């Protein structure tokens, strides 16, 4: 029989208990696209301890719970954006301290990606502040070259460049792009309270183009915009209805920026953040849930509870797009204290498949992950 490594009987029993699967989770198919909004609301409204236990059980069915994806984000074109997102310091419609700058050169990006890789990040994300790529032919060619070079370093590459056409998405795929970030931000009903310069359906159109081009989708939301519980459920419901769930679902906590319309918003309550993460984990079982902006405001114990509730990715490094980030050394020390470690590149099966890895290689990935997990926790 298996016995947890060096664990006395009482701890071994606890080990079995914490790796047990809730009955509801066992009965669930791998992914569902037919969630009713009320059904998700019912999950969200569960007592928090039960919700976290159920989310942790689903997490263990679909992911190695000891692995956290480490991503580093770089702003490659700052400020001067014509959109009016009310949370964003980069909108030219708000009076903030963010100064507009041009698209950066390729070399600083490669240098930043190399540094991120040396520090253990396996995904490098590049963000540009603009509505879309219209009239940016030369800039787009430079970005394609950035994607090629970062992908050539063996890292997963993500970009967030606003609205995309199918042709632009295909060029990014051809260059080696792994994932495209395009957040839905909140529910369809609340969206016009936050942004008026584009529609929810335009967001969904870009996500559809990204999907059609064979790129993984990263799409999530922001908490603390002034939305209700129903809006948070509405966001998860919209994502759950996509023909394919996003490979990543970032959960951001608003960092209110002076000069933006949301500068005086109350920070989202921690129990709301963890409740949203746990609900997303249950509804989107194979998706990576990323604890994104605002993480540096959380206590270490709060972050640990988010990992328990199913979060399995973070942004780490020097800076988010315009807000502070937790540095690599602090993150590594924290993850070590909780028995967590960085996830290898392309270890998420859905992402590996889009990268064209053979089924044998994917199977080897899965076996390696399982063997590492078993070796770390059990002995014969
Ligand atoms: S969130 Fe993006 S699209 Fe919106 S204003 Fe900021 S940079 Fe522009």
Image (cartoon, rainbow, N blue to C red):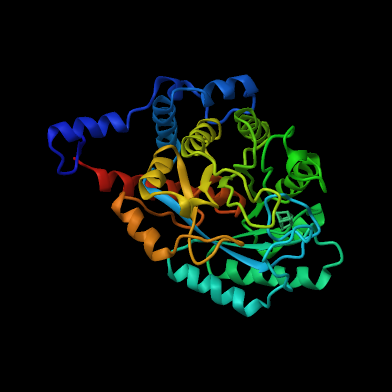
Of residue 176 and residue 278, the one placed in the foreground of this image is: 278
Q: How many marks?
A: 0
Quadrant assignment, res 127:
bottom right
* Residue 367 appears anywhere in the view: no
Q: Is residue 179 above or below residue 16?
A: below
Quadrant assignment, res 151:
bottom right
Identity of the residue drawn at 20% across and 30% down: 13
* Residue 7 appears anywhere in the view: yes
User: Could you tell me residue 293's position as x and y percent?
Assistant: 55, 52
User: Could you tell me residue 99's position as x and y percent?
Assistant: 70, 70
* Apparent side of residue 155 relative to residue 21 in the rendered image (left or right): right
Q: Is residue 50 above or below residue 304?
A: above
* Apparent side of residue 228 relative to residue 304 in the rendered image (left or right): right
* Apparent side of residue 63 relative to residue 38 in the rendered image (left or right): left
User: Could you tell me residue 163's position as x and y percent?
Assistant: 78, 53
| Residue occupying the far front of the picture | 264
Q: Quadrant of ligand 1?
A: bottom right
Identify the image quadrant of the N terminus: top left
Identify the image quadrant of the C terminus: top left
User: Could you tell me residue 38's position as x and y percent?
Assistant: 62, 20
Q: Is residue 269 above or below residue 293?
A: above
Identity of the residue drawn at 47% across and 22% down: 46
| Residue occupying the far left of the picture | 8
Identity of the residue drawn at 75% across and 58% down: 94
| Residue occupying the far right of the picture | 135
Quadrant assignment, res 60:
top left
Identity of the residue drawn at 32% across and 46% down: 373
């Amino acid at each position: 029989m298996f016995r947890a490594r060096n664990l006395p009987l009482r701890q071994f029993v606890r080990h079995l208990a914490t790796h047990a699967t809730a009955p509801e989770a066992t009965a669930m198919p791998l992914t569902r696209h037919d969630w009713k909004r009320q059904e998700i609301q019912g999950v969200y409204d569960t007592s928090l301890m039960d919700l976290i236990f159920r989310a942790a059980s689903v997490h263990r069915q679909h992911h190695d719970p000891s692995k956290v994806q480490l991503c580093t984000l770089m702003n490659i074109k700052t400020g001067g954006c014509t959109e009016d997102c009310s949370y964003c310091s980069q909108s030219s419609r708000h009076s903030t301290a963010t100064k507009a700058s041009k698209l950066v050169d390729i070399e600083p990006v490669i240098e930043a990606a190399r540094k991120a890789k040396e520090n253990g990040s396996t995904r490098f994300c590049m963000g540009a502040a603009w509505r879309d790529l219209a009239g940016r032919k030369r800039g787009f060619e430079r970005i394609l070259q950035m994607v090629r070079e970062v992908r050539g370093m063996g890292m997963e590459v993500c970009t967030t460049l606003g609205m995309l056409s199918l042709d632009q998405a295909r060029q990014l795929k051809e260059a080696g792009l792994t994932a495209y970030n395009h957040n839905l931000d909140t529910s369809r009903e609340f969206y016009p309270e936050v942004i008026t310069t584009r529609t929810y359906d335009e967001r969904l159109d870009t996500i559809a183009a990204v999907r059609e081009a064979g790129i993984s989708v990263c799409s999530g939301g922001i908490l603390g915009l002034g939305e209700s519980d129903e809006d948070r459920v509405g966001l998860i419901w919209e994502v759950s209805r996509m023909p394919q769930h996003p490979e990543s679902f970032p959960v951001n906590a608003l960092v209110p920026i002076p000069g933006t319309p949301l500068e005086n918003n109350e920070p989202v309550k921690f129990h709301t953040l963890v409740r949203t993460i746990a609900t997303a984990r249950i509804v989107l079982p194979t998706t990576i849930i990323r604890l994104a902006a605002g993480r540096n405001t959380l206590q270490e114990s709060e972050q640990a509870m988010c990992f328990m509730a199913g979060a399995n990715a973070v942004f780490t490094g020097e800076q988010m797009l315009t807000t502070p980030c937790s540095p690599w050394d602090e993150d590594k020390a924290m993850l070590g204290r909780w028995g967590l470690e960085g996830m290898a590149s392309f270890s998420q099966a859905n992402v590996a498949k889009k990268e064209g890895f053979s089924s044998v290689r994917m199977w080897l990935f899965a076996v390696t992950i399982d063997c590492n997990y078993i070796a770390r926790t059990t002995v014969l």
